[in-house]
Image (tube, rainbow, N blue to C red):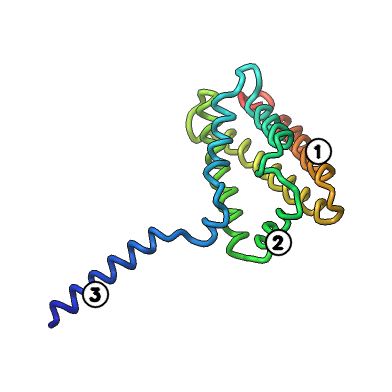
Amino acid sequence: MAKIIQLCVAKAMTTRATQAHAIPRKEDMFFDREEEGRTLLRAALRQRDPAISPVETLRLLAHRLVADDSPYISFSAAGQGFIATVEESAALKARARAIRDELVEVVAQTLTESTGRESGDPLAHLAASLLLATWSVALIEAHRAFRQHGDAQRARAGFLALVDQGHTGLNAALTGTPYA
């Protein structure tokens, strides 16, 4: 009988462990386009025109995403529900910050690859951190502006103005590097 109980417990533990890996966390299901975002950033840097700096390539990407009405840079009444849900959930806010930090690593690594610099270059990490901080602030402020006045065009213009301002700072910080 003890042997049967041990087998049942072992089977239950295996099933629980398998289920834990098979069922995504609600935070991961909520941010279901995360991998697409990583791929988009990598592709922009890997396929950039060599005459255009990596930082400028990413600034132009923001402008292209707005022009293409990308779901990544969307300001709408429907999007406000998503934003409100994130703002009201500590777990979702934590996951959003974690995704931002993961994207910093993706951008830093891709910056070094796209410029032939050594992996772990602190200037690439600085560039990636400043870039993601810029885009984060621009997105948050544009969503706030949309919530206030309901004008998507005005929110997009505000987003791009902050992106451009942040990229001015990025270029100043990275002058003399292959990233600016």
Q: Amino acid at mark 2?
A: Ala
Q: Amino acid at mark 1?
A: Ala
**Residue drawn at 79 percent across, 54 percent down:** 144
Q: Nearer the viewer, residue 38 or 52?
A: 38
Of the numbered discs 1 and 2, the one sitting upstream in the chain is 2
In the image, which disc is placed on residue 136? Answer: none
Instruction: Look at label 3 and name its amino acid.
Output: Val
In the rendered image, residue 53, in percent from the top left (x then y), is placed at 65, 23
**SS at badge 1:** helix
Residue 115 at x, y percent in the picture: 55, 24
Question: Is residue 141 placed above or below 21 in the rendered structure?
Answer: above
Which residue, given by chain and number where applicable, does mark 2 sit on? 84
User: Circle 1 is placed at which residue position?
Assistant: 161
Q: Which residue is mark 3?
A: 9
Q: Quadrant of residue 91?
A: bottom right
Question: Circle 3 sits in a helix, a strand or a loop, which is it?
Answer: helix
